[in-house]
Image: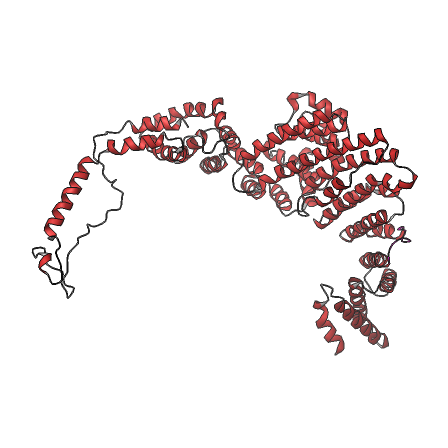
Amino acid sequence: LWLRQATQLLLATVDIEAPIALPPASLALPFVRVVPSTESGAPVPMEVDAGATKDAGPKEPVTELFVRQRAFLAECAKRATVGGLMAPLVELLHDASSSALAFELWGSLFPQMWSQLGPKEQKERVAPLTLLLSKAYNLKQHSHSPNVVQGWLQALGACVPLPKLPAGLLKHLAKHYNAWHLAMPLLQQFADHDPDETQWYDGLGELHSLLGDRDGVYALWSRRAVHEETKAALSLEQFGKWHSAQAAYADCMNRWQAGEMALVNTPQAELALWEEGIVRSAKALNQWELLSDYAKTWPHTQPELLMECAWKSADWDRLRELFGKKHTLPSQPGRIKMLETYAAIHDGKLTDAERFCSEGIQFALAQWNLLPSMGTTSHTPLLQMFQQFQELQESAQMLMELNHAMRSGQMPELSSILLTWRERLPNVWEELPAWNDLVSWRNHMFSHINNVLGRVADASKSQLGSLGFQEMLWTIVRFAHVARRQQLPEACVSIINKIQSVSATSGPSAENMTNSFARLREQARSCLQLPELAQHGLDALNAADMTYLPPKKKAEVFQLKAELLLMEGRAPGSLQAAEAEASMRMAVMVSGEMPKAWLLWGEFCDRAHRAAAGAADAELAERALSCFLVAAQLRHERAASMLPRVLALLD
C-alpha cells in the first residue's frame, strides 16, 4: 500500500515538539483522590499521618505518596510530545502486517485535511482525484483487500462536502476492486443530493443487478420510473408472476411504438428496462425460440443472447462465427470460455476443451474474489458456472469412453457419471434459466451417447442402445416438474410438448414406462393450473397406453382425469361430473391405497349431498362420510381438516 507513504507525509506536517493534549471534544473525567480512612470509615484529614491511624501499619505518608506521583506525571507530560508518539506510529505504519492500520489511519487523516481546504480548492482537487483513481496501475492490487482504491473511497466517503466523482468511475471501482460497500453509499448520497442526474441511478441499478439484489433494483425503479405501468410490471416480476410481467412489459412497448401520448416521452433508460424485462421474462418462461428470433433480429445489440441461443439450438456454425467477432463479445470472459468449451467438445477437440475449461475456471475464481466476502445472491451464478465446468470435464471423459467404444466395439462404462448427473441437480427453487443451461447441455450429450450406443449395441443389449433417450427423458421430465412447482404451468406444458418424439422412440421397458408416466403426470398437473388447457390434459390422459402400468399408477391416471373433468363442470348432475365420478370410482377400485382419490370422491359426494334432497341425500352423506374416513385412515395431509365435516355428517 503506497498509502503508507502518503500517510507518513501527512503525519510529517505536524509540530513534533508540541505537547500532546486531548482534543476539546474529548470527554474529561474528574481527578481521583486517594484518601485514607479511619477504623470507623471516616476520611482522615490530609494533615494526619496515615501511619498514625490504628492498624495502619508501616505505610508511607500520604503527602510523600502524592509528591512522588505528581513528579512522575510531570516527567511524563514533559516527555509526551507529538514527536514521541509519531516515531513509533510511523514504524508500525511500515510494518508488513499493518495494512489495516494504514488503511484506517488514512481514512481518518484525509477527511481532516480535506476540511482545511476552501470550496474552490476542493473543487480543483476533484479532477486530479478522478485521474488518480482511474489509473491502470491500481489494478495490480485489485485482488488484495484492503487495497489502495478501497482506502481512497473510505476516506472520500468521510469528507464533508463529498467530492463529486463520476458515476461511471465509482461503478468501475466497485466491480474491479471489491469496493461495493464503499462505492454504493457514495452513489446513493449523490442520487439523494442530485436526483435529476440519471447517472447515479444508472450506476446504482447496475451494481444492484451485478450483486443479484433484485429487491434493490425494484426499489430504485419505484423511485425513478415515470409511468405507473412500469411500476406495476416490476411488482409482478418481483413476485414471480413472469407471464403477467411479460405481458405488462410488452403492452408498454406496443403502446409506445404506437405513439400513445402518455408514453411518447418515456426516458431512454425506462425503454431499456421494458426491453430487458421482456427478455428476462422470456428466459424465466423458457421461451428460447422467441429469444432466438429476437436476438437474430438485433445481432449487434444482443451478442451474448445470440451466442446463448446458438449453442442451445445446436447452431455451432453461428457460434463459431460469433467467436471470431471480438468486438461483439460480452464482457464476461468466464462465460465465453464456457461457450468455447461447449463448441470444442462438440467438435471432439478434447485438448482445446480442457484448455478452455481451465481458463474459464480461473476467470470464474478471479470474479469470485471480487465479490463481497459475505455470501449473497451474487455468488449463485458463479456456483452454477462451476457446476457447469465440472460437467464439461465429465462430458470430455464420457467422450473419451465413447471414442474408445467405437474403436473397440465394446459398451462404454458410463453408469457412474450418469448416476452422478441424476443426483447432482440444481435446487427446486432455483430459476428456470439455471436449469435450462444444465438440461440443454446434457441433452446434447445424451443425443451423442445414443448415437454411439446405437452403433455398438448388439441385439442382446438393445435396451442399452436407448440409454441416452432414457436419461434425456428423465432429465426433461424433472425439468418440467420444477417448472410446475414454481407455478409456471405454461413453461411446463412447453417442455413436455418438446419430448413427445423422445418418448415415442422408446420401447415398453420398465424405465421407459416410468418416465412416460412421469411425463403424463406432469402434463396433467400443469393443465390443472391452467383451466383453459383442461381439455388438452384430458386428451393426453385418454390417449395414454396403460397396459404396462402398475395398479397404483393406473389409479393415479383416473384420479387426474377426474380432477380435470371437475374443472370443466363442477355442478352435480352435469355430464363432466358424471364422468368424474366414474373416474373416481375406477381409481379406488384399481387401487384402494389412493388417499387423494378417496378425499376427492368424498368432497364430490359432499357437494352433491348438499345440493340433493330426499332419499338420495342420506346415501350421498353416507358415501362422503366413508370416503373421508378412509382418506384419514390412509393419512392424507388434508384429511384431518375434514374431521369437523365428518362430525357434522354423523349428526
Q: Residue furthest left?
A: 47
Q: Magenta region, mostly helix, strand or loop?
A: loop
Q: Is residue 119 left or right of residue 407?
A: left
**143 part of magenta stretch:** no
In the image, residue 3 sits, relative to residue 611, either above or below, namely above
Residue 419, horizontal then vertical, whole percent:
75, 43
Q: Is residue 153 left or right of residue 400?
A: left
Give, as a single range, the part of the protein colored magenta. Answer: 543-550
Q: Between 519 and 614, which is closer to the camera in this rendering?
A: 519
Q: In the picture, which quadrant includes the C terminus? A: bottom right
Q: Looking at the image, which residue is at 13% across and 58% down?
A: 57
Q: Is residue 203 left or right of residue 162?
A: right
Residue 222, horizontal then vertical, whole percent:
56, 42
In the image, residue 618 sits, relative to residue 199, either above or below, namely below
Q: Residue furthest bottom?
A: 651
Q: Is residue 404 visible?
A: yes
Residue 21, horizontal then vertical, whole percent:
22, 38
